[in-house]
Amino acid sequence: MKVILLGGTGMVGQGVLRECLLDSNVDAVLALGRAPTGVEHSKLRELVRADLFDLTPVAGELTGYDACLFCLGVSSTGMSEEAYRRITYELTLSVARTLADVNPGSRFLYVSGASTDSSEHGRMMWARVKGRTENALLKLPLDAYMFRPGLIQPLHGVRSKTRAYRTFYAITRPLYPLLRRVAPRLVTSSETLGKAMVAVAANGAPKRILETADINAI
């Protein structure tokens, strides 16, 4: 299996990249992003693009891949809805449409989040935008799956680029064993999420929208 990974420098993407490189079912990984991942591996090739909105010049390099693992995202904190929508909705759909053209029917795995609003009309701005993004992806000629993890425990040196998140994870780290026992449907790890995404990329899943419990079960 050959996969394209977006967001490989973020916390989720780091974990997914690690599992892709460890899994024998993955033959090649193309990391597409604005900056290199800093990882060197025989399976890994990097494609750095300053403008991810226009992939036309490199469309030929994206052909022949079985799946796209879309882990790219930003925090909505301090962002207007317009700015957040541009990154979360417009960029995601721009990439997905390009891949639907060059690899029609291929799998597209999108990392969304717990409490995403499929109605697109809820009170939380980020949840509305994520819901709109999910709904649009599911209409494309792709075999699309939405991943909605809740609290993610970073493992194996994986860390967030956002200082506030790093502080939060450092404070809550001692609580993870307890949380996994009392609320197993709400907590996962970067390793588990990465393994689940590789498994769905290879074999699909019985559901299009995968909550934390589904991710952990996979």
Image (cartoon, helix red, strand yellow):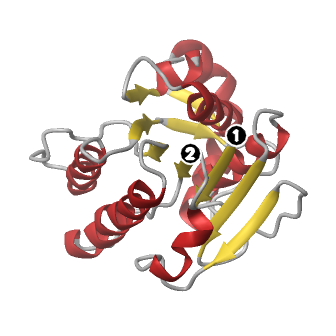
Q: Which residue is mark 2?
A: 67
Count residues near mark 1 (Cα–Cα under 10 Å), then give few for <14, some for 14-19, many for 20+. some
Residue at (58% x, 21% y) in the render = 216
Residue at (84% x, 54% y) in the render = 43
Q: Is residue 212 left or right of residue 34?
A: left
Towards the viewer: 161 or 118: 118
Tags 2 and 1 touching, CB below 8 Å: yes
Q: Which mark is residue 1?
A: 1
Residue type highlighted by circle 2? Ala
Can residue 76 be seen at all in this image of the molecule?
Answer: no
Q: Is residue 87 above or below residue 122?
A: below
Q: Is residue 83 above or below residue 152?
A: below
Count residues near mark 2 (Cα–Cα under 10 Å), then give few for <14, some for 14-19, many for 20+. many
Measured from the top left, where is residue 5 in percent x and y?
61, 56
Please report whichever mark, 2 or 1, sits nearer to the chain's N-terminal start. Answer: 1
Towards the viewer: 196 or 56: 56
Residue type highlighted by circle 1? Met
